[in-house]
């Protein structure tokens, strides 16, 4: 029996969360085409007869502009130092950039096995994929280089096989029925944030935080009361939309995801609040769970 921890790293929007969800087979981490969507360390567990792979989803390493950004980077580096295998995600459809080289250099100091994962293989033809694989293999002396597509499922099982070979011999770390150790209220808050990120202007994503204030179960109904926090009054107007239309859409989208997660009908009550410059305020960051 093998069991251990692995994480996917890479610059923002390299497909890390989508790949993790594809491997675990259930939505564990929220995804968005906006960079820096992931803000928490989320663990997803893949159970096999002879192994247990615990995948740790982390924020993308980036140049921090706020206190929140600095804390997210600290979280990433701490996670890297504690896992057995690291998958460095580099998209097939983008040139290798300074960010990829920077992260590769950071990983060189670690004891974990580092596998280069060329993501989004479905977006390029075979010739371009082959060129990217050669370019990636020249970045560093990786343990393996594996192309995958989380969307089509191409080589996802192969990647799991490869990562598992680098895990230590160990008894199970989590019970058979556990897919994640993420607290329910945090997952719900993340699903609301994912819905709120859809269609907002580019300046808004990092300004949105969500806190679930209360959950009440009444038979087959779960009542969820959540607050969406933004940094300025003008942003509040964007999230609410004309006559509340955007907030209504957010609620509808999030409610469907939460019902799928909980397996019950959900009544979702959302309020938008302003927490001025919360990304730079230690007190506000603590209140919002950072």
Image (cartoon, helix red, strand yellow):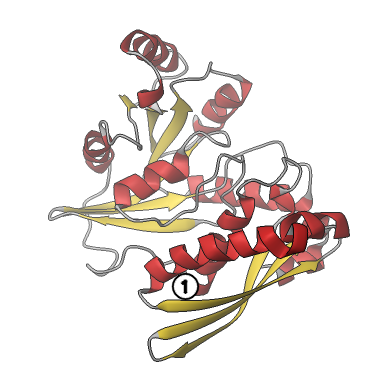
Q: Quadrant of residue 150?
A: top left
147 sits to left or right of 61: left
Secondary element under disc 1, as helix, strand or loop, is helix
| Residue at screen point 62% across, 21% down | 98
| Residue at screen point 59% across, 54% down | 39
- Does residue 290 appear in the picture of this structure? no
Q: Quadrant of residue 47?
A: bottom left
99 sits to left or right of 29: right
**Is 20 in front, or is 138?**
20
Q: Which residue is mark 1?
A: 184
Q: Quadrant of residue 43?
A: bottom left
Residue furthest front in the image: 243
| Residue at screen point 46% across, 40% down | 16
Residue 227 position, x and y percent, is 68, 71
Q: Residues within 10 Å of mark 1 (few under 14, many from 20)?
A: some
Quadrant position of the C terminus in the picture: bottom right
| Residue at screen point 25% across, 54% down | 3
**Is 84 in front, or is 127?**
127
Q: Considering only vertical position in the picture, is 262 above or below 38? A: below
- Does residue 257 appear in the picture of this structure? yes
């Amino acid at each position: 029996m093998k069991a251990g921890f692995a994480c996917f790293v890479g610059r923002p929007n390299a497909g890390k969360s989508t790949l993790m969800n594809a491997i675990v087979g259930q939505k564990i981490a929220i995804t968005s085409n906006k960079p820096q969507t992931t803000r928490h360390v989320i663990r997803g567990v893949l159970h096999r007869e002879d192994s247990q792979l615990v995948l740790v989803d982390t924020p993308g390493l980036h140049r921090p502009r706020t206190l929140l950004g600095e804390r997210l980077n600290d979280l990433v580096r701490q996670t890297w130092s504690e896992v057995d295998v690291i998958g460095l995600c580099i998209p097939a459809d983008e040139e290798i950039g300074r960010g990829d080289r920077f992260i590769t250099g950071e990983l060189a100091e670690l004891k974990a096995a580092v596998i280069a994962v060329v993501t989004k293989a479905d977006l390029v033809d075979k010739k371009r994929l082959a060129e990217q694989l050669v370019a990636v293999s020249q970045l560093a002396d990786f343990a393996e280089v594996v192309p995958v597509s989380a969307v089509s499922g191409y080589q996802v099982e192969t990647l799991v096989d490869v990562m598992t070979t680098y895990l230590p011999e160990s008894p199970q770390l989590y019970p058979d029925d556990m897919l994640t150790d993420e607290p329910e209220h945090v997952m719900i808050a993340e699903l609301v944030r994912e819905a709120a990120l859809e269609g907002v202007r580019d300046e808004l994503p990092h300004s949105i935080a969500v806190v679930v204030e209360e959950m009440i179960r009444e038979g087959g109904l779960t009542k969820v009361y959540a607050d969406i926090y933004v940094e300025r009054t003008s942003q509040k107007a964007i999230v609410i939309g004309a006559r509340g239309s955007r907030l209504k859409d957010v609620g509808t989208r999030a409610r469907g995801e939460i019902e799928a997660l909980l397996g019950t009908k959900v009544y979702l009550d959302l309020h938008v609040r302003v927490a001025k410059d919360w990304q730079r305020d230690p007190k506000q960051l603590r209140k919002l769970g950072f």
